[in-house]
Image (cartoon, rainbow, N blue to C red):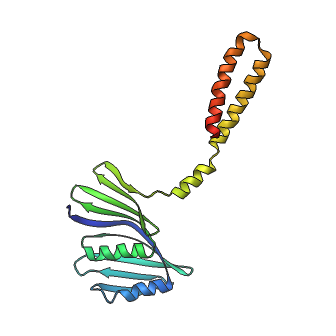
Amino acid sequence: MARRLATEYVKARMQMTEPQLTLFLSSLPGQTLVWRVKVMDNGNQEVVLEDGQGDAITFLFEKQGNRYVCVTSCRLLRPKLTQIMHKLVMEFRGEAVVNRIFAGFTMQYVYAEGKVCQIVEQQGEQARIVYEQKDFARDLQMMYGQDIVEQQIAVIREQINELLDARNRELNDQVTFIDQQLHELSHQLFVLEA
């Protein structure tokens, strides 16, 4: 199994209410971390977590109405803070782009609403999608919202009407050709209406 060299949070975004932020801060003393909280005049809070071995994360929680919003990025070499970041993104339904770096390749995880929605393996310039979450309800809604088939049916009906008018005007030598076209168009219409 490949050994992870580093975990890079390219961008992580989380939102917390004041009680959630208080809960997060109250969970820190039980862990073997060095942490500092700085409360600013405007209500923003800066939280710095260090694992004592060189890894550190700085969270700047900006007060926006009744929520605290944090956008951060960091590069972590050891698992302790990596696990904390992972837990925070999942628990507070965050959005993140995370690169897990291995020797020779990188696995990129994209989180939305705290869940992995895409995993991409990158080796040099090549990228391969390993996993992608499908939103079937949204895809179906988009499909039903499209009226391409209805437009095609309208065009075919118009062509059939024109051919029927032409058949009524024509003599016997063109009727066979028109009937063949009518047969093909009626088959297409049957398929589209099904």
The structure residue drawn at horizontal position 45% and vertical position 79%, both measured from the top left corner, is: 61
Q: Is residue 60 left or right of residue 49?
A: right
> Where is residue 57 drawn, in percent x and y?
33, 76
Front-most of 136 and 22? 136
Q: What is the residue that sits farthest to the right in this orientation? A: 169
Q: Is residue 103 left or right of residue 188?
A: left
> Where is residue 153 drawn, in percent x and y?
67, 36
The structure residue drawn at horizontal position 37% and vertical position 75%, both measured from the top left corner, is: 87
Considering only vertical position in the picture, is 70 above or below 40? Answer: above
Residue 23 position by quadrant: bottom left
Front-most of 171 and 123? 171
Considering only vertical position in the picture, is 122 above or below 167? Answer: below
Q: Is residue 176 left or right of residue 122?
A: right
Tell me the quarter of the image containing the N terminus.
bottom left
Considering only vertical position in the picture, is 175 above or below 45? Answer: above
Tell me the quarter of the image containing the C terminus.
top right
> Where is residue 138 drawn, in percent x and y?
55, 57
The structure residue drawn at horizontal position 38% and vertical position 82%, both measured from the top left corner, is: 47
The structure residue drawn at horizontal position 67% and vertical position 41%, both measured from the top left corner, is: 150
Front-most of 12 and 111? 111
Q: What is the residue that sits farthest to the top in this orientation? A: 173
Front-most of 100 and 115? 115
Res 88 seen here:
yes
Res 39 seen here:
no
> Where is residue 155 drawn, in percent x and y?
69, 33
